[in-house]
Amino acid sequence: MITTLRSILFYCGLIPSTIFFSLTGVVILPLPRKLRYAVILNWARFASFWLRVTCGLSWQVTGRENIPAGPCVIMSKHQSAWETIVLQLIFPPQCQVVKRELLRVPIFGLGLASLNPIAIDRSAGARALKTVLAEGKKRIADGWCVLLFPEGTRVPAGRSGRYTQTGAALARDAGCPLVPVAHNAGVFWPKNSLRKEPGVVEVVIGPPIAPDGRSTAELTRELEAWIEATSRQILPPGFTIPTPPGVSE
């Protein structure tokens, strides 16, 4: 009961702050991209701070030394909304690949635009891939990192989805490294759940993977092997992996 109440309190602070920074994003749209990003990044700082105060959920990082000095393609496990917020605080200025529909949400969409996202139509198939590659190369050339979730959608902690080769293709075409990221945020902030459990989210950043003329399939296999093995290692003792829908225990 207390955990639920604390989670509600978190949203009581998150929603007004989101509205405020979305409106701010509208006002500052004429400013340069990196200046807009620096301003809106304060929303992520507040959300992380407020999450720790209200829900007792903090985070720690292992492997910061593996973050390249220049632009890279960040490939992260996707378990909740947590990583879309906090990875902005861990890595240098970055853009995320988002659903185009999010930019059409009144006020929020214009605020999101200040974070320099790559908006795609997920139903577009090959055209969406071309958009990510074309826009991603431009962002990297301009000095931005690009954050991708190779599984495409949120997957519960302890489980894995199908990894796409989009990130590997972008790193190859842009000539920059892939940086794998594993975490266990889904243990504390499950998908589509109001409750935010107290604890410490473990984030592990792996050694950069250089394309070096390798195939996207080979790069993706190496990336997936590292992320999945590391994700299993940082699951809390006694954590029960959820059963996939339609599968009886």
Image: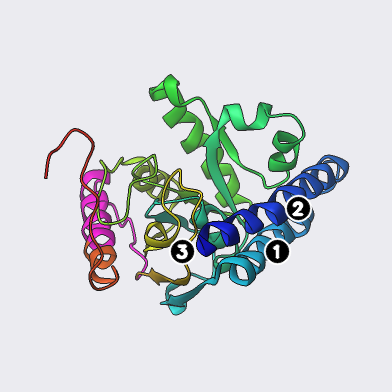
Label 1, residues with CA under 10 Å away: few <14, some 14-19, many ≥20: some
Q: Which mark is residue 197?
A: 3
Label 3 or label 1, whichever lies nearer to me, is 3
Instruction: Classify the position of the C terminus by image quarter.
Output: top left
Which amino acid type is marked by label 1?
Phe
Q: Where is residue 6 shown, x and y percent of the image?
A: 59, 62
Identified at 88% across, 42% down, the residue is: 27
Quote the CA–CA distance across marks 3 and 1. Answer: 18 Å
Q: Which residues are magenta?
A: 207-228
Q: Which mark is residue 46?
A: 1
Which amino acid type is marked by label 2?
Ser
- Mark 3: secondary structure: loop
Residue 138 falls in image quadrant:
top right
- Mark 2: secondary structure: helix
Taking 233 as reference, is 107 left or right? right
Taking 239 as reference, is 18 left or right? right
- The residue lying toward the viewer, choosing from 87 and 177, is 87
- Mark 1: secondary structure: helix
Coloured how?
A: rainbow
Q: Residue furthest left?
A: 249
Label 2, residues with CA under 10 Å away: few <14, some 14-19, many ≥20: some
Which residue is under mark 2? 17
